[in-house]
Image (cartoon, helix red, strand yellow):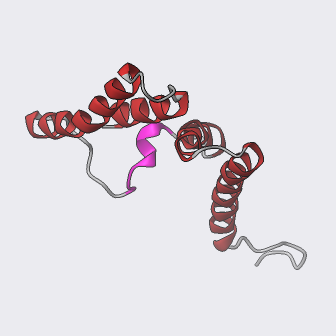
Amino acid sequence: MPPACAQPETPDAGRFRRYAEGTAAVALWMGIGLVFRLSANAYLATGNPIALGFQGSVRRGSLSAMRVRSAPPFRLGIRWTVIGLLLIIVPLINLVGLIRSHENPFSPAAAVWMAAAVVGA
């Protein structure tokens, strides 16, 4: 029997901490967007390092742990290679078009966002 002064360990404490950490990361991201008045592309591109930093420093997990918890191990076979290459086509065309465009001013934020889409695919 535990002593009368001992605090019982609640299973909801870990869940509350995870929700608080996730909420803080989203609040940071939203705050950066509001304070610096970022464009849509800059705002989205800012989310990538925040997500990576959150996973590495706050959650202390690997990047592969960001996937669905109960998913089977990912194996890159010929089928997934073809799907990945198909997913790269549109952002790559947009990135090349953005870089080569002389009519509109060059947008570094849009270029970073398209490059992240290519890498993500």
How far from the left and from the top, in percent, is residue 101? Answer: 38, 24
Which is more toward the observer, 8 or 112? Answer: 112
User: What is the quadrant of the N terminus in the image?
Assistant: bottom right
- On the rendered structure, is 32 left or right of 97? right
For the record, the magenta segment spans 62-69
How far from the left and from the top, in percent, is residue 74? Answer: 25, 42
Which is more toward the observer, 25 or 97? Answer: 97
User: Residue visible at 22% across and 34% down?
Assistant: 89
Considering every residue shown, the one lying at the far front of the view is: 103
How far from the left and from the top, in percent, is residue 61? Answer: 53, 41
Q: Quadrant of residue 88?
A: top left
How far from the left and from the top, in percent, is residue 100? Answer: 36, 20
The question of residue 20 being in magenta is answered with no
Considering every residue shown, the one lying at the far right of the view is: 5
Say above or below: 51 vs 94: below
Which is more toward the observer, 2 or 45? Answer: 45
